Amino acid sequence: MMLGAVDGVDADAIIIGSGPGGAAVAHSLTQAGWSVILLEKGRNHLLSLQAPFAPLGHFSNDEIKFTQRHFLGPDPILEPRTFRRSLADGDRLLTGEVNNLPSTLGGGGVHADGKLPRFREIDFALRSELGPVEGADIADWPVSYADLEPYYAEAEQLVGVAGEETNPFAAWRSGPFPMPPGADMFGAQISSAAAERAGLHPYRAPTGVNSVEYQGRPACNNCGFCAFYGCPIEAKGDPVGMLRAALETGRCQIIPSAYATEITTDPARTRATGVRYLDLSVAPNAQGDAAVRELRAHHLVLAGGAFETPRLLLRNELGNSSGRVGQHLMFHFQTLVVGAFRERLWGASRGRSVTHLHDDHIDGDSASRAAAQAAGLPWIRGGIVEHGSSTGPVNEALLQGAGPHHPLAMRNSELRERLWVFTMQGEDLSQQSNCVDLDPTVRDAWGFAAGRVTYQPHQHELVTSNHVAPILEGVLRDAGAVWTAGSTSPPVGDHAGASPMGLAPASYHIMGTAKMGFDPLNSVVDPTSRLWDLPNVIIADSSVFPTSTGYGPTLTLVALATRAARLLTGNPLRQSQPT
Amino acid sequence: MQTGLTPTQTLSLIALMNKLVPGDDLSPAAGDSGGAEYVNMLLTAFDYDPPHIWAGGPFSGRHGGAASFENWLELGPWEILAWKSRIEDLNNQYHAGLDSLGPELAEISDEFRELVFTHACEALYGDPVYGGNREMSGWLAIDYRGDSQPKGYTDQEVSAP
Ligand SMILES: Cc1cc2nc3c(=O)[nH]c(=O)nc-3n(C[C@H](O)[C@H](O)[C@H](O)COP(=O)(O)OP(=O)(O)OC[C@H]3O[C@@H](n4cnc5c(N)ncnc54)[C@H](O)[C@@H]3O)c2cc1C
Ligand code: SF4
């Protein structure tokens, strides 16, 4: 039984995808009195859909379930994706798991460890501030930091972000963080002290994890199973807080196991009228097909994430008069520097995976400017460096390899308990040729073309990584590391064939595939996140980002989604001021 | 299709796992610590209802709370199809691979070796509910507590262990 069933529609809005973006829109629209139906293709392991919407208790500290057995989906047997670096690789280089964020109620928010920094003023005006780079598409965003600040503040409240104002590079804020930061990991204190000795400015990561009881959910108890795991005690706020609040209004219906495949439109294809979806909660019929259902609404919200949203649009041949849907795919170019210590750091078994960051390599210094100049680039920008460690023993054992050395190597645990990792989420320049498109032959279990990634980094990413990696190795050695090593994802150069993280980018920060702009000729959505071609459709995920910046995308996509929803209901937030 | 391992295959698998992930004075070998039980539970997962694929939650009971890992989770209809197909494939690989092992365990393809090694690691260091890591011997050897909920760790244990 559907919610609204008025005016010939089932709800005011249908939202496709229940990750942080979709959850933020569900929250905002229902608060404004709209009825929404939220379709999620994955299963519901998050919360009961009956009041009082209690946790289902499916999450646990279980490495097998979460990292080895596709518990949160997508299962690559049902939903394969493909990858190639360029046309030279042919139709594809590999088939299977490519940047698989979970497909489950709550999306990637469920198992992210949620470092949620804001972007800075310059991130929204890179072209004006720094100028173009040959071979890349450097654009200003059609919104400024000041436009977005009130929505950042609201997003932090909704998710529940714990942090403090000690990052010297951070943009201005209109108010404090909702919670103080949580416990510092032991290893992060050591790496932060060494970073400070190197003249860097580490700070406690703003994190979407409760440091105190917040909105009825408990404080984190540092269980050590954070990145890649659902939280067994609901201390992670993203996106369960927003989904529960939407359900509590009585105006939100969530339908899990509902795979939206078709956007229905008016005959002129200028307005969406609804969605057809496959009901995956029932077994296939005798022909092996899934049951098809249809819903109608006044508005449609696409929040399937920056991989699935363009795939859906491309399959439906909608929203693409610019030809840009799927193009300008960006990840963060990851530079991973590891150091093995004599002492036990406990990083992989206690705490929230990452508790400290530093931003110094984003703006850089005279040395980074010299590195840019030497490479013939006008500028380079890195990204946040995460101080952390989080491999479980199964994954360490796989890395240690077979043979007589295995038992001693596992007891010494150089790749887990004594390892510390710096991960730089480097800014990835937008290139039109990097894209998600439809694989010509590989199909999912329901016969739809698999999404295919074509991706190669720009010279900028390689130069930045080569410049920053030795600095990070130096910090780890000064911190006491016995040995250090660096690699990148995607792998490049000598490592290209041998990376344990695979050939495709391992980044779960996916952006840019339906970018926002001022001009319908070269962008997919307008400055309010509406599709230029179908104005009653908004996109509420990081597809809309014109640039990647060097910060995690999630808080910004939640802020943008909230803004788009509030603009849709005529309920925008007022401009804010620095405190 | 035969599911699960015969007694002969079980002995071969234990020997192979012990070779790939051996023990020493302080650590158990993967086969001796329940590696074959782990594989057998996976190969026969659909003999149980719910299938023994995803253990339940939220707590094991070892650190407080009601023990619930044995409350195996239901799969959705399409997940059942995917896992049946995966497990059928695994059964075939195990039967073919183990039946063709020579006496020195030398007749082994790279692909089968990789499969057995992966399962040996999962068995020895995964939660005991999946059939391996007998009496938590894998974890004890590396001084690893495993799951910690709902007790978790105090801020002091995280910051100054
Ligand atoms: C281990 C890990 C750590 C991370 N840490 C951080 C971090 O520290 N900071 C940060 O900023 N980001 C982090 N991320 C990334 C973060 O998870 C993503 O940025 C975020 O989840 C994206 O939100 P989204 O709503 O756009 O999409 P998603 O979270 O991907 O959600 C989209 C949902 O839509 C569903 N869907 C897709 N297509 C359809 C369809 N056709 N029909 C129905 N449903 C559909 C999917 O199943 C999915 O559940 C991390 C990710 C991982 C995996
Ligand atoms: S570390 Fe904290 S937030 Fe993360 S899963 Fe454990 S209790 Fe939850």
Image (cartoon, helix red, strand yellow):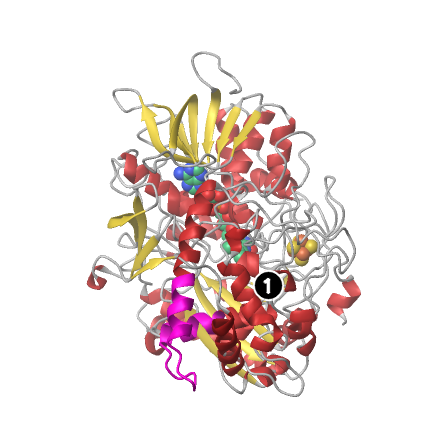
Q: Which residues are magenta?
A: B91-118
Q: Is residue A41 above or below residue B159?
A: above
Do we see residue B134 in this rendering?
A: yes
Image coordinates of residue B82 in percent, x first then y, are 42, 50
Q: Is residue A486 above or below residue A182?
A: below
- Figure check: B97 above or below B25: above
The picture places residue A56, in percent across and down from the top left corner, at 65, 42
Residue at position x 79%, y 56% in the image: B64
In this rendering, position of residue A234 left or right of residue A318? right
The percent coordinates of residue A404 (x first, y second) are 53, 87
The C terminus of chain A is located in which quarter? top right
Q: Is residue B94 magenta?
A: yes
Quick one: which residue is furthest to the top in this view? A7
Q: Secondary structure at mark 1?
A: strand
Frontmost residue, A504 versus A406? A406
Residue A85 sits above or below residue B136 on the image? above
Tell which of A400 and A470 is nearer to you.
A400
